[in-house]
Amino acid sequence: MTQHELSPIDRIADARRREMAIEHLLFGTLRFLAQRHPELLDKLEVSLAHLWDKADDVPRDDEAVRDVARVFLKSLRADA
């Protein structure tokens, strides 16, 4: 079954699964790098000012996207 043949619910579930897998792999990679290069988390923290929500409609919320990244970084710092 291709992506176009999936029901809307199945497409949402598929997107969520991809998001979870990518988050897991990215978190593990960043944790590995941060253990070897502690300054990486500081540089990422500074870069959050440039992070924004790419949505063009009403639910666009740049600060909410930054908040998600801050939580992610806080968790990485706790693991360090």
Image (tube, rainbow, N blue to C red):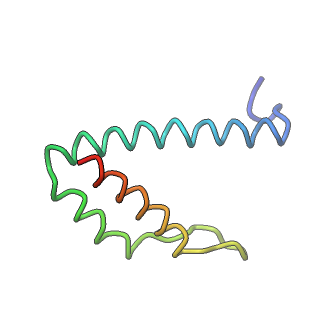
Please state which of residues 11 and 35 is positioned toward the viewer in this rendering. Answer: 35
Residue at the (50%, 71%) spot, across then down: 52
Q: Residue furthest front?
A: 78
Please state which of residues 24 and 80 is positioned toward the viewer in this rendering. Answer: 80
Image position, residue 51 (x, y; %): 44, 69
Q: Residue furthest top?
A: 1
User: Which picture quadrant has residue 8?
Assistant: top right
Image position, residue 32 (x, y; %): 24, 39
Q: Is residue 41 left or right of residue 60?
A: left
User: Which picture quadrant has residue 7?
Assistant: top right
Image position, residue 55 (x, y; %): 64, 68
The answer to whether residue 78 is above or below residue 71 is above
Residue at the (25%, 59%) spot, across then down: 41
Residue at the (21%, 48%) spot, across then down: 34
Q: Is residue 51 left or right of residue 19?
A: left
User: Which picture quadrant has residue 19?
Assistant: top right
The answer to whether residue 76 is above or below residue 26 is below
Residue at the (52%, 67%) spot, across then down: 65
Tell me the quadrant of the picture where the N terminus can be found.
Answer: top right
Image position, residue 79 (x, y; %): 29, 46
